[in-house]
Image (cartoon, coloured by chain):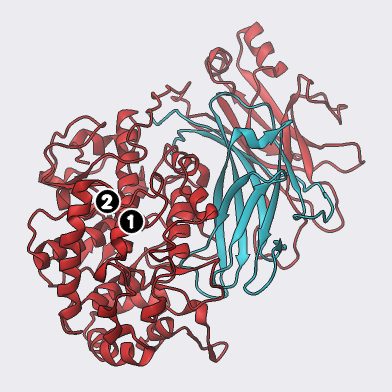
Chain colours: A red, B cyan
């Protein structure tokens, strides 16, 4: 997808200097948001099409060439996979852009090594075709082929082949690269190599499921006689899941169900953990396809095939899988542009996102790219490609819905004696009541969850209720909703017990009807009362702010 | 940052359905009747799982909702939070009734325990809108 300067300005809520825009002078007035780009030099096709099948011939030729290269060569097949092993982001918002760069340079490598100047990496549309394409079991297109056995026949062979040159490469790294690897959890080379072998320092034993190395005969669980994704994996790549994954309206939203990308993290090297929020497409089709091809679920506890752990690019299916993930990002971008919505993080987040350094790429000629930034890869133009049709190409684009009163921004309330008060301008109230949206104003209510022997977990939000009103039902003119906590308090949970809930304010509140009647500003007093019939103490409001929805 | 969608999360109590065959049923209630533009999701926060361990989600009557298959998680770390779309046909009487099942290596399928699934939240998004 080629983006115009106007497209990028739409994404930036702050004034970003032109020199910071990711494409600089390369920005072109591309075509409209829908459809393939006829000006792209390379077209990535569905592997199931004749064009896609033709590309596999060249792909195989390129892999053969890479298998023949010495381990010291950055284009050696296994050395190429180690770029991913050392540097790939998962569970964070750089996931898409880093893999775009990685697949793009790899595509150039195959173009050169295969001798096919028109080569473009086909994509595996697993939504339409939930099985590994048959041709991906031919020759070197499967990592179980005999061509791999001199290198992956057993762990000793693999170690003797690749470890010495990898150590030499490690010792040549810059201080910036070493700092990145350190933050990834690899302060020493041995730490990294332990993830190859699956050795656990804590357990002082090998854990087969954690082993990134895969023996040749076990390098891919799925086979020619068993190529299909099982029912569970097929569900995770189904139209329902993928369509849902394309519906978020923001590239990144802390509310993960509306976030196209996964968590915002400090760097792309941060490994996923308990604080990670996985977006739908990364959390479902991406992860499950990786894991299932390696045998998760079928051959637990492992050892698994390549695709399950971070040497996954040793399996050639990796690139078709990620080509499809990249295609979905491209589709989402087109949808956003058509709806007039941002395509990248907004505000201050944009500069942070674009500036992230990527230091380990290898280019199509086999040299190291050197220091690059995420912003260098946000557009498909950098590798001059677009996509042929696949699932999602024909999904309807929702028209942009104009939000209501935006000029007021966030209105913060004052808190006293456990209740909050705010003044809403009359104009805002009238717009709220006239809005086509069911609730165009949202109150963000912060409270502390009661601890100890308190059993109350649900609290009604009361707006302008008289002081003697302690319980309401859902029809009350003072009732704005019920906040509820899920699960018991857990004494060892290292997390804050404050929570903020977003509460859509119903139009039926008496506070609004009174304000409208009087043509006056609406004074809102918000407090919380225990819901349900059990006697309990009220819980104080810690903070309230009101903002328009959308 | 202005939001392009309304998102509000109400975390609800589990209704104890007992240990019926096929796994314990957890019930989550919608906060209100859905608008036509609303989308419903589960946000499932996981603890530390064994390598290769997955969490299967389904409705109480067996409709599949998805399989969470953590990828790239270092051993011993919690596996993060996953967003699971809930199709409208899985919502009955304003409620979503789900099972969360896991099959440890070499073991039999069983309910995911509180160390494996730390929290499940129901989220309703009103999609559309955008920044101005």
Residue B103, by quadrant, is bottom right
Name the subunit of mark 2.
A
Front residue of this view, candidates B8 and A33: A33
How far apart marks 2 and 1 lie (CA) works out to 8 Å
Name the subunit of mark 1.
A
Q: Is residue A449 left or right of residue B104?
A: right
Residue at left 75%, top 62%?
A490
In x, y percent, where is residue A471?
A: 86, 30
Mark 1, residues whose alpha carbon is within 10 Å: few (<14), some, or many (≥20)?
some
Look at the picture and state if A175 lies above or below A447.
below
Residue at left 20%, top 77%?
A67
The C terminus of chain B sits in image quarter: top left
Look at the picture and state if A306 lies above or below B57.
below
Front residue of this view, candidates A234 and B31: A234
| Residue A44 showing in the rendered view | no
Please give the residue where the numbered disc 2 appears in the rendered image: A47
Callout 1 secondary element: loop
| The residue positioned farthest toward the front in the image shown | A225
In x, y percent, where is residue A200?
A: 51, 86
Report if the CB atoms under discs 2 and 1 are less than 8 Å apart.
yes
């Amino acid at each position: 997808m080629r983006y115009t300067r106007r497209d990028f300005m739409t994404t930036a809520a702050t004034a970003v200097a032109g020199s910071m825009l990711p494409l600089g002078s390369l920005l072109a007035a591309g075509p409209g948001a829908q459809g393939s780009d006829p000006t792209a030099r390379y077209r990535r096709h569905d592997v199931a099409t004749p064009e896609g099948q033709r590309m596999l011939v060249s792909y195989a030729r390129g892999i053969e060439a890479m298998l023949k290269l010495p381990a010291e060569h950055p284009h050696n097949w296994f050395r190429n996979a180690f770029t991913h092993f050392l540097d790939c982001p998962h569970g964070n918002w750089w996931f898409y852009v880093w893999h775009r760069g990685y697949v793009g340079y790899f595509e150039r490598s195959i173009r050169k090594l295969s001798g096919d100047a028109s080569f473009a990496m086909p994509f595996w549309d697993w939504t339409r075709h939930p099985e590994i394409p048959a041709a991906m079991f031919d020759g070197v297109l499967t990592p179980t082929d005999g061509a791999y056995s001199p290198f992956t026949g057993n762990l000793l062979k693999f170690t003797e082949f690749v470890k010495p040159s990898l150590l030499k490469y490690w010792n040549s790294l810059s201080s910036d690269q070493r700092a990145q690897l350190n933050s990834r959890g690899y302060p020493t080379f041995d730490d990294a190599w332990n993830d190859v072998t699956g050795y656990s320092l804590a357990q002082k034993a090998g854990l087969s499921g954690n082993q990134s190395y895969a023996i040749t005969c076990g390098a891919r669980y799925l086979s020619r006689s068993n190529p299909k994704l099982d029912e569970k994996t097929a569900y995770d790549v189904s139209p329902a899941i993928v369509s849902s994954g394309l519906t978020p309206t923001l590239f990144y939203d802390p509310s993960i169900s509306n976030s196209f990308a996964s968590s915002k993290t400090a760097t792309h090297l941060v490994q996923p953990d308990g604080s990670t929020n996985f977006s739908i497409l990364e959390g479902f089709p991406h992860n499950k396809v990786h894991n299932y091809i390696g045998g998760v679920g079928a051959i637990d506890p492992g050892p698994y095939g390549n695709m399950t752990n971070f040497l996954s690019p040793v399996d050639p299916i990796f690139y078709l899988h990620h080509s499809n993930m990249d295609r979905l990002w491209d589709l989402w971008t087109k949808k956003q542009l058509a709806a007039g919505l941002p395509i990248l993080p907004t505000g201050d987040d944009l500069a942070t996102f674009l500036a992230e350094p990527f230091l380990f790429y290898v280019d199509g000629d086999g040299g190291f790219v050197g220091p690059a930034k995420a912003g260098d890869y946000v557009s498909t133009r950098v590798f001059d490609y677009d996509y042929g049709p696949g699932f999602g190409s024909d999904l309807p684009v929702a028209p942009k819905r104009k939000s209501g009163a935006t000029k007021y921004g966030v209105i913060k309330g004052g808190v006293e004696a456990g209740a909050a008060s705010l003044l809403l301008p009359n104009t805002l109230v009238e717009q709220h009541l006239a809005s086509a949206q069911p609730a165009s104003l949202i109150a963000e209510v912060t409270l502390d969850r009661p601890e100890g022997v308190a059993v109350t977990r649900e609290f009604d939000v009361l707006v302008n209720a008289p002081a003697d009103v302690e319980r309401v039902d859902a029809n009350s003119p003072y009732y704005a909703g019920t906040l509820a906590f899920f699960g018991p308090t857990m004494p060892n949970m290292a997390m804050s017990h404050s929570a903020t809930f977003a509460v859509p304010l119903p139009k039926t509140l008496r506070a609004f009807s009174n304000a409208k009647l009087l043509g006056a500003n609406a004074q809102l007093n918000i407090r919380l009362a225990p819901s349900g019939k059990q006697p309990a103490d009220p819980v104080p409001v810690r903070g309230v702010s009101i903002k328009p929805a959308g | 940052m202005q939001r392009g969608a309304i998102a509000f999360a109400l975390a609800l109590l589990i209704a104890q359905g007992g240990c019926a065959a096929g796994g314990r049923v957890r019930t989550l209630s919608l906060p209100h009747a859905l608008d036509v533009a609303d989308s419903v999701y589960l946000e499932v926060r996981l603890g530390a799982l064994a390598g290769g361990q997955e969490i299967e989600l389904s409705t109480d009557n067996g409709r599949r909702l998805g399989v969470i298959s953590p990828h790239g998680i270092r051993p011993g770390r919690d596996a993060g939070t996953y967003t699971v779309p809930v199709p409208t046909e899985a919502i009955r009487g304003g409620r979503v009734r789900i099972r969360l099942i896991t099959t440890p290596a070499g073991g039999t399928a069983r309910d995911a325990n509180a160390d494996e699934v730390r929290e499940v939240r129901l989220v309703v998004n009103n999609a559309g809108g955008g920044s101005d």
